[in-house]
Image (cartoon, helix red, strand yellow):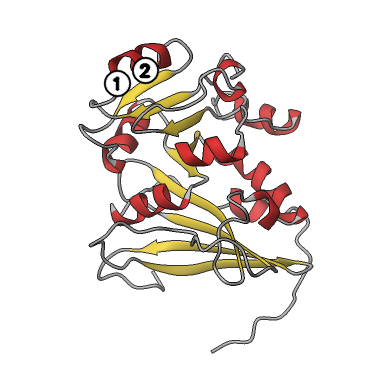
């Protein structure tokens, strides 16, 4: 056991995350989950994440999108949080262009039903180089599918449900090799159960008493997944933890 103590100041909290080598994913693409939880594990307050997030977390959450090829979100999170197209600073946009990426990453929304407000800004105000993606399944209502294709690029990933592995293969085929998943808990649980979560960036907010909803809701019958702590930072009372997946039979020291 080791005692963690306050250490040297970090000049730029984003830099440790930018320094991570994500060029060798275990599967189709590297998938990072970025979540915030209260001290009791709750993932929301009154159905929304905003009240859980402290000022340091909000800043890092927005800036983390700089490193992603695409930002992946479950439909319920889009509905509750009122997602808009991604915004980045001019410097972040320029750095992305230098890497051959669009100035901002597109948003990819996962929805089995396509029961979404397709007039919302995340669809109709997306950057021209980062059109919003909709990931759905073959069983979706044909009329909704036709309407969705007017405002987004639609990917079919599965028959009666959205299959995580199929969805990620579809994103990888479009050149999206680094996927940043911002929830929600059920979609994150699907990714974990399918062994597709390479990295989890978890913020611990100094609050308790939120909704009885954990950071990840694992589907019934899914096994356990192991993760190794790769980084820890603190600002005021907010703790930032970074974990990487440990393959079955692997070592956390690898």
Q: Against 72, is 41 above or below?
A: below
> In the image, what residue occupies the spot 46% across and 17% down?
152
- Total numbered labels: 2
Q: Nearer the viewer, residue 141 or 232?
A: 141
Q: Residue 239: x, y in percent?
A: 67, 67
Q: Residues within 10 Å of mark 2 (few under 14, many from 20)?
A: some
Q: Which residue is mark 1?
A: 141
Q: Residue 215: x, y in percent?
A: 49, 59
The secondary structure type at the circle numbered 1 is loop
Residue 107 in the figure: left or right of residue 91: left
Residue 28 picture quarter: top left
Residue 43: tell me if it is visible.
Answer: yes
Q: Nearer the viewer, residue 193 or 228?
A: 193
Residue 89 in the figure: left or right of residue 143: right
Q: CA distance from mark 1 to mark 2?
A: 5 Å
Q: Which residue is mark 2?
A: 144
Q: Residue 224: x, y in percent?
A: 30, 68
The answer to whether the residues at label 1 and label 2 have Cβ atoms under 8 Å apart is yes
């Amino acid at each position: 056991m080791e005692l963690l103590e306050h250490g040297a100041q970090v000049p730029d909290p984003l830099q440790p995350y930018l320094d991570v080598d994500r060029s060798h994913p275990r599967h189709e693409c590297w998938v990072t989950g970025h979540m915030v939880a209260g001290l009791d594990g709750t993932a929301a307050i009154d159905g929304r994440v905003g009240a859980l997030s402290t000022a340091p977390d909000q800043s890092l959450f927005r800036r983390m999108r700089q490193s992603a090829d695409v930002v992946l979100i479950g439909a319920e999170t889009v509905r509750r949080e009122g997602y808009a197209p991604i915004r980045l600073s001019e410097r972040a946009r320029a750095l992305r262009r230098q890497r051959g990426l669009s100035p901002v990453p597109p948003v990819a929304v996962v929805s089995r039903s396509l029961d979404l407000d397709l007039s919302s800004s995340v669809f109709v105000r997306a950057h021209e180089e980062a059109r919003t993606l909709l990931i759905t399944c073959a069983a979706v209502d044909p009329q909704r599918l036709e309407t969705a294709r007017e405002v987004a690029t639609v990917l079919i990933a599965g028959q009666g449900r959205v299959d995580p592995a199929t969805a990620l293969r579809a994103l990888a085929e479009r050149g999206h090799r680094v996927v940043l998943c911002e929830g929600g808990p059920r979609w994150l649980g699907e990714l974990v159960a399918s062994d597709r979560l390479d990295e989890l960036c978890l913020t611990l907010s100094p609050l308790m008493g939120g909704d009885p909803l954990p950071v990840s809701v694992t589907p019934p019958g899914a096994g356990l997944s192991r993760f190794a702590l790769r980084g820890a930072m603190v600002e005021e009372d907010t703790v930032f933890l970074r974990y990487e997946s440990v393959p079955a039979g692997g070592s956390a020291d690898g």
